[in-house]
Amino acid sequence: RFRHDDPSMIGFWGNHLADQGLALGADYLTLTYCRAQGYSFGLL
């Protein structure tokens, strides 16, 4: 039976959220970079 204050569960959720945040950040940076490149070349 898992408990919300179980340290292993906190570590699990912390790692999961960190992975999600990194993935979202990478997607955002890629989109922003591609848009900047597109604008500079007049493609978008």
Image: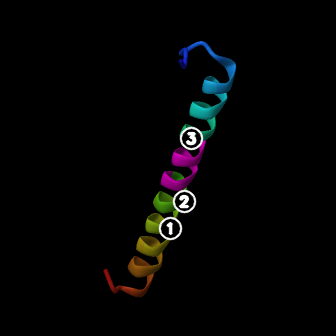
In the image, what residue occupies the spot 54% across and 19% down? 2
Q: What residue type is labelled 1?
A: Thr
Give the image location of residue 11, x and y in percent. Answer: 66, 29
Residue 13: x %, y % from top left:
57, 32
The residue stretch that appears in magenta: 18-24
Residue 26 versus residue 11: which sits nearer the camera? 11
- Under tag 2, what secondary structure? helix
Q: Mark 1 points at which residue?
A: 30
Disc number lying in front (1 or 3): 3
Q: In which quarter of the image is residue 10?
A: top right
Residue denoted by label 2: 26
Residue 7: x and y in percent read: 68, 19
Image-based side of 36 in relation to 17, left or right: left
Q: How crowded is mark 3: few (under 14 residues within 10 Å), some or many (20 or more)?
A: few
What secondary structure is the magenta-colored segment mainly?
Answer: helix
- Are circles 1 and 2 on residues that touch, CB within 8 Å? yes
Which of these two is toward me, 20 or 43? 20
Sequence-first disc among 2 and 3 = 3
Q: Is residue 20 magenta?
A: yes
In the picture of the structure, the residue carrying the numbered disc 3 is 16
To which quarter of the image does residue 8 belong? top right
At 58% from the left and 47% from the top, the residue drawn is 19
Mark 3 or mark 1, which is nearer the start of the sequence?
3
Residue 9's place in the image compared with 22, above or below, is above
Name the element at disc 1: helix
The residue drawn where x is 35% and y is 85% is 42
Labels 2, 3: front one: 3
Residue pictured at 50% horizontal, 70% vertical: 33
User: Which amino acid is tagged 3?
Assistant: His
In the depicted structure, whether residue 29 falls above or below residue 33: above
Give the quarter of the image for residue 9.
top right
